[in-house]
Image (cartoon, helix red, strand yellow):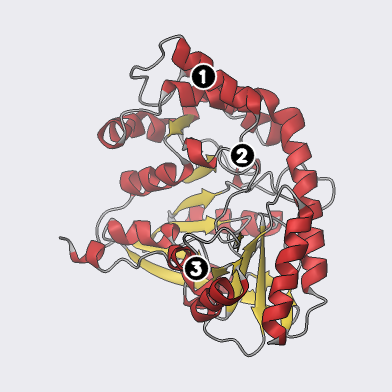
Amino acid sequence: MRAAIAELSASRIREVANAGIGRSDVLAFWFGESDAPTPQAIKDAAVASIQRGETFYAHNLGLPELRAAIADYASSLHRPVTADRIAVTSAGVNALMLAQQVLLDAGDEVVAVVPVWPNLTAQPIIMGATVKRVSLHPDATGQWQLDLAELLAAITPATKMLVVNAPNNPTGWTLTRAEQQAILDHCRQTGTWILADEVYERLFYEGDATAAPSFLDIADPDDRLVVVHSFSKSFLMTGWRLGNLVGPAALIEQLGKLIEFNTSCAPVFVQRAGLAALELAPTSVPELQAHLKLCRDTLVGALRELPRVMVATPPGAMYAFLCVDGEGDSLALAKRLVVENGLGLAPGAAFGDEGEGWLRWCFASQDVARLRLGVARLAQALNT
């Protein structure tokens, strides 16, 4: 076995979840998904596709009609995007891995903004690249911020790729338009590719914006930019494993070969479900966004009433990232909360050393009362 694979860390979120296996009383907020099922119209589209016999291979890059629909959807939010710049993938994480496979050689340097979902920093290591971590920093209120000068100084002509996830998992931090423009301008000068994980772009709660700021708002079609999206979060389709990426047309053309050697194609009936999701998007996504904002405000407001807890209001994504004063070992604390209090949270250490001492709470819940009950259990833990 390759040493790089043997040395990969197992998921610490799974480690916490395993401590609660078999217990029906645990309130689980550890995984990054809503507890709401996929809308019926999306499920119906998949069932109808199967009943029509659409159980065969499809084009490596996805159904032409789905690529066109994704392009239209992206164009409604950002600068115009054409279908030849779209690749359909078997999940957002598959899109991220494909982007790194097509761009990285062993020994390349990757800069990553952290703390972040661990897959984003593990994937370059799997490819044999080295990762230079640039950390966000929490302010006195618990709001995580980017030191732009620090990031730009880390990106040099030796940097093959910048990996940035915004809105961010786990902190909710979101890039500003000015920060994106500065990063894009700098990476143009250094020749660095930007891999932007924007799967939470529609889960954004600032002002009346329909989406978080995106690199697609400012980039040219031939810029060294790959933007990854997923149907998982804003369409409630985590288990369907459907994603897509936007990149330069010349790169997408070559990417089809790589998809052939990974998954060949996304299943047709899953792609039909994706088409149905895009048709529902004008109403379903704003409704979900409004509900998650309510969940966010309910949870953060309740957490701020607890002693020793510091938490900021995240501008995007679907997580509250909180710090409990006096608790430095987030994995031990998360396990204790499961075993003793029936409360399942993700340890901050799962997202890198930068997240140690923090806990991630996914607030994507159908019932806000469930969030309040979870806070009550945390309060009980702190009191004891």
> For the residue labelled by badge 1, is the local secondary structure a helix, a strand or a loop?
helix
Depth-wise, is mark 1 or mark 2 nearer the camera?
1
> For the residue labelled by badge 3, is the local secondary structure a helix, a strand or a loop?
helix
Query: What crowding class fits label 3: few (fewer than 14 Cα within 10 Å), some (14-19), or many (20 or more)?
Result: many
Q: CA distance from mark 2 to mark 3?
A: 23 Å
As displayed, is residue 142 above or below residue 276? below
The residue labelled by disc 2 is: 236
Tell me, yes or no, whether the two marked residues, 1 and 3, touch with CB atoms within 8 Å. Answer: no
Q: What's the amino acid at mark 2?
A: Leu
The residue located at (25%, 35%) in the rendering is 261
The residue labelled by disc 1 is: 47
> Where is residue 35 drawn, in percent x and y?
63, 47
Query: What crowding class fits label 2: few (fewer than 14 Cα within 10 Å), some (14-19), or many (20 or more)?
Result: many
As displayed, is residue 312 above or below residue 270? below
The residue labelled by disc 3 is: 351
Is residue 81 visible from the viewing direction of this image?
A: yes
Mark closer to the chain start, 1 or 3: 1
Q: Dividing the image into 4 quarters, which one contains the N terminus?
A: bottom left
The residue located at (43%, 24%) in the rendering is 62
> For the residue labelled by badge 2, is the local secondary structure a helix, a strand or a loop?
loop
Q: CA distance from mark 1 to mark 2?
A: 17 Å
Query: What crowding class fits label 1: few (fewer than 14 Cα within 10 Å), some (14-19), or many (20 or more)?
Result: some
Which of the labelled discs sits on residue 135, or is there none?
none
Q: CA distance from mark 1 to mark 3?
A: 37 Å
